[in-house]
Image (cartoon, rainbow, N blue to C red):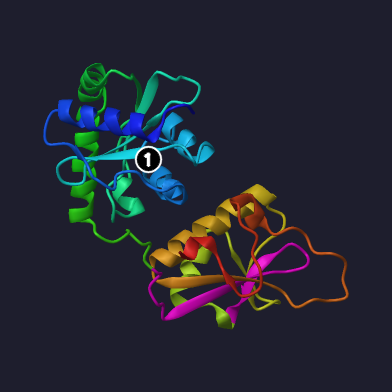
Amino acid sequence: MTASRTDLYAFATALARHLPGQWYRKYEGFPAPQDHRPVADRVWDCGPAHSALLDFPDAPVALLHGRDDEQLCVTERPRYPHQYLIAPLEPEGSKPHHFHHVDEPNGIAVPDDPLRAAAAVARRVLPRYHRALEAVHHNARVQPEPPHRPAAPEVAETLTLVWYPDGVVGAPYRSVPEDARMVLYGCRFQYSPHEVAFVLPASYSTSDRALLIQSAVRLLTAQGIGVNFRHAAPTSAGPTSRPPTAALGTRPTAGTPSSARR
């Protein structure tokens, strides 16, 4: 970096005079080196200007201010002694979700001729910068706070499906809410009289059981019935099979609600 503070001061001041609108450089427009990172974090285009601010913390930086929240960062272009980098800054006080679906206005490299540099900035930077700022301000007005995902509603009834060591998925009859029984029948669960339970036989393939369980969970939660998955209590039998919900992208654990409940 070869530009002196005086060189950058003169260039930034002349550039502001030639830009359309009311642009000016504040008297305290040179951020101290320790303030380069906050400026870099606000550079809207994470390109050469962002890298230059972080890689050359002792290089001078000027900030130009326009109307409303408009700000431009001016710094020398590394390894190009007769060029500068001009990059728009994000508006202060905005939240991350305000920038969602907003096209970033890019920064550009300009020659050390303020008149030519101002023409390039006016043509290539400011129109996109204005549109981006308007979009951010609009998002801030219509949605000040982040669109948090709502919590699941409370349910009056809950069904716990149990993964048994022999590969069967089911639930004791008395634990199955009455409104859930027809759903289980429709999803190929069977009532086993000698076990006094609803069961989905292990004779179905892993993928078929996964799809049937997914359908049952979707239908039950649509009716306001919560669904949990648990493993059966450990026994002295051999190792258990892998639960079919692995095919759904989730692995149930004791006391953990199914992903379909959300």
Amino acid at the residue labelled 1? Val
Question: Does residue 250 sit above or below 136 in this rendering?
Answer: below
Question: Does residue 182 sit above or below 119 in this rendering?
Answer: below
Q: Which residue is mark 1?
A: 43
Image location of residue 17, percent across then percent down: 16, 29
User: Does residue 193 appear in the picture of this structure?
Assistant: yes
In the figure, is residue 176 to the left or right of 65?
right
Image mark count: 1
Image location of residue 232, percent across then percent down: 72, 74
Residue under the point 38% across and 38% down: 61
> Is residue 156 found inside the magenta-colored segment of the image?
yes
User: Does residue 186 appear in the picture of this structure?
Assistant: no
Residue under the point 16% across and 46% down: 68
In the figure, is residue 159 to the left or right of 236?
left
**Range of residues picked out in magenta:** 151-173
Image location of residue 6, percent across then percent down: 34, 33
Which is more toward the observer, 230 or 70? 70
Residue under the point 41% across and 48% down: 32
Question: Does residue 41 sit above or below 218 in this rendering?
Answer: above
> Is residue 230 found inside the magenta-colored segment of the image?
no
Image location of residue 56, percent across then percent down: 51, 37
